[in-house]
Amino acid sequence: MTTETTFGLPRFWRLSPAQVGASLGCDLKGLGESDAQQRLQLYGRNADSPSHVVGPLRAVLRRLLEPLSLILLVAGIISMVTGDVIGGAIIVLILTLSIGLDTVQEGHAVKAAEELRRSVALKAEVKRDGAYGEIDVDLVVPGDIVRVRAGDIVPADALILESKAFTAGEAALTGEPYPVTKQADLPSDENDTSNALFRGSVAQTGEAVALVVNTGPNTMFGAAASALAEAQVRTPFERDLHEFGLVVARLTLALVVIVLAFRVVFGRDVLDSLLFSVALAVGLTPELLPMITTVTLSRGALRMAKRKVIVKRLAAIHDLGAMSVLCTDKTGTLTSAEITLARSIAADGRDDPRAAELGAIAAALGGDRGSLDTALLAGADQAAAGWALGGQQTFDFSRRLGSVLAIRGQEQILIVKGAPEAVIELCTQQRHGDVIAVLDATGRAGMCERVHALAQEGLRTVAIASRPWSGAPRDVETNDEQDLTFEGLCAFADPPKPTAAAAIAQLARAGIALKILSGDDPVVVKRLAGLVGLKADRVLSGSDIAQLGDEALAVQVRSADAFGRLAPDQKSRIVKALQASGEVVGFLGDGINDAPALKVADIGLSVDGATGVAQSAADMILLSSDLEVVADGVEEGRRTFANILKYVRMGASSNFGNMLSMAVASIVLPFLPMLPTQILLNNLLYDLSELGIPFDRVSPQATARPQRWDMKRLLRFAGIMGPLSSLFDFLTFGALLYLFHATPDEFRTAWFLESMATQILVIFIIRTNGRPWSNQADPMLTASSLTALFAALIVPFTPAGAWFGFVAPPVSVLAGIAVLVAAYLVSAEALKSFAVRTGRPRRHHRHHRQHGHS
């Protein structure tokens, strides 16, 4: 584990206690109270910066000031001012509900720092003025001497001065599933932190006295806290929605200004021209987009809950569907985080159960109930039956071994269990089946090579030795652990989940690359990558990444799929490097060390049972810590976005086409082609026809690849399908004026009918890239569309039609309109494939990213 903090004393574990003390300006006997108070003023409290809290009012204003929201608000107000009170109120109500729901859904961010504060110690045992006493943890300062016992949470980053049988659990910080032995010796390896304690880790056995080096934000834990305190940046969905709003705003403003200017220049009534221009603006505005988006995302959240995914931020559903790279921690996500006995190996290298059986006896009679002993007991659960404890020597962390005297009837045997290099040195013999042979220097070297080879496979080993015991039972002494017979090795693993390889393959088929970002040893990470089907010819370590600038790192992350010995800030650097190359990055993690990466990722994923910090930083929580759940969530995210995109595409083509027709007609015709109230009715009925979109079916092609908003393709679609709609509008104008000689009221009524029929019926064509009869719409969409169409067709023939200025057109006009509508639908189906053509997909590194649609 490494840290690259820019404050405090980084890599302090590479220095001696005297050097660290000199750097801090203190001795190793503890601080006086007055000195501690001065240091508290200098270094600050041992706490994290408060989270960036956005109040409800600012959160609402931030959403309200988005271009699309402003357009909708202005359109609603103008609609009410110009007489359409109901329509305007509906627009404002939809906008209010959408903003309110978003604000409530995303209010979880404030909890992040609070979860951090709850997860660290509240009291610390500190030596002040020559005596130990308890103080509040936030009063601990660099230079303090702290004492940590089994069960305590380490209050600060510290250098060990002395320890007794001390181990610490650092899984939440580093991803390392095994307990870590901590002692005062200066390590030879720069990445070995066995002489350091880190804030937030948990003391599992023994006790230690340590010199506090870094506190608060300068600790590794503090780096995670400071990342969570940063303000949330816009997600890909929010950025794309903002860009879409700007495009709509520019088109609306340009069309309104042009129409108003031309009508005034040609001497038309200024008030009528203004009202007509305002109606055009409302007609161009996708006022139901907030509702369609919110309903579709909410329905997606409910569907994802059935797939064991809890959605904390609605927009994250789209971001999950857009994800092109998934970075994941190793422990608990790809692996089970449960240490298991992988092999029991005899002295000659053959698999033999005897070593595991003796190890299980030692674990049952005198073990520490740690993860390795638990795995031994699970792997050979019946071995200890009938054995009793005659004496023992508890595990000595300096000698790295322990022993028990096991008794069963008249049989007495001394069993020694510990680190291979320590146990092998005490052995003079080795067992080959029932034969005992001499163990010489060559044999010892061969066994050490075997241990090294197992380590290259990611397996941790414990050696087992024994000898018969003669005499009365008593506690074992060091002199008794001599002339031992080497029985063999027990090899342990944190195995990959059975579903991991298949889930990774499923993600790859969906166009998502997977990268392992772990705090564990690169050797272990490389072996795991191979087991789950990832190509990891090289594994970048934290020390490698520390030497790379941001630009160089952006190049390296494209070709590397596995990373080991990463500090929390290095995980977030890798995520940012991938984002800089255009990827939409997801991060799946469950530890404190994962919190910064979860925060900066486009989509943060945590699991049920993860640390509170990780869950607070995440956008979604998986109720099952399995990549299969992620793959299912990706499919649901893409299905949800596909339906949102349908509304945008329909509105971009139909609204743009009809408003363009009205704009041109209003300039060349001597009368308004449609009254402002008729335009608003047209727009309202069309929006009602699309209420079934959130429930619509989605084709498999739409969920096959990562999806994002693509403004160029949207504009291309609108630029082809919109003018096609306008072309048939102009044909309608010509037929009504020169073939049927329609009056202004008949003209407006007939065009209203033609406009509604083409807009609504074309939904069934452009909702899918395939043929409409082979990919049928959901009954909800069919019902909402046909109901709105029926209402539009019947209004002119009812008394209510007169309120809007409609008259019943002749049968010949209706027949002509029916022919034009049919011709338009055939043309739309013919041009659709050209309008949605994707061209060459963009290549980022090893896979194509295509923007799917339905």
Image: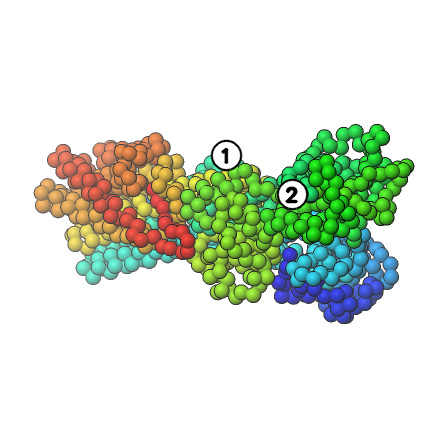
Residue 571 picture location, percent across and down: 56, 56
Mark 1 neighbour density, 10 Å: few (under 14) some (14–19) many (20 or more): few
Q: Residue at x 35, y 33 (%)?
A: 778
Whether label 2 touches label 1, CB < 8 Å = no
Amino acid beneath label 1: Lys
Residue 306: give its label.
Answer: 1
Q: Nearer the viewer, residue 648 or 393?
A: 393
Of callouts 2 and 1, which one flags the residue occurring earlier in the amino acid sequence?
Answer: 1
Say whether residue 310 is visible. no
Q: Give SS at disc 2.
A: loop
Compared to 317, does 712 lie above or below? below
Q: Quadrant of residue 773?
A: top left
Q: Horizontally, is 158 left or right of 335 in the view?
A: right
Mark 2 neighbour density, 10 Å: few (under 14) some (14–19) many (20 or more): some
Q: Give SS at disc 1.
A: helix
- Which residue, as the protein is rendered here, is positioned at the far right? 472
Quadrant the N terminus occupies:
bottom right
Q: Residue at x 20, y 53 (%)?
A: 664
Q: Horizontally, is 838 left or right of 138 in the view?
A: left
Q: Nearer the viewer, mark 2 or mark 1?
A: 2
Residue annotated with mark 2: 349
Quadrant the C terminus occupies:
top left
Residue 102 picture location, percent across and down: 49, 46
Residue 239 picture location, percent across and down: 43, 54
- Which residue, as the protein is rendered here, is positioned at the far left? 739
Residue 541: give its label.
Answer: none
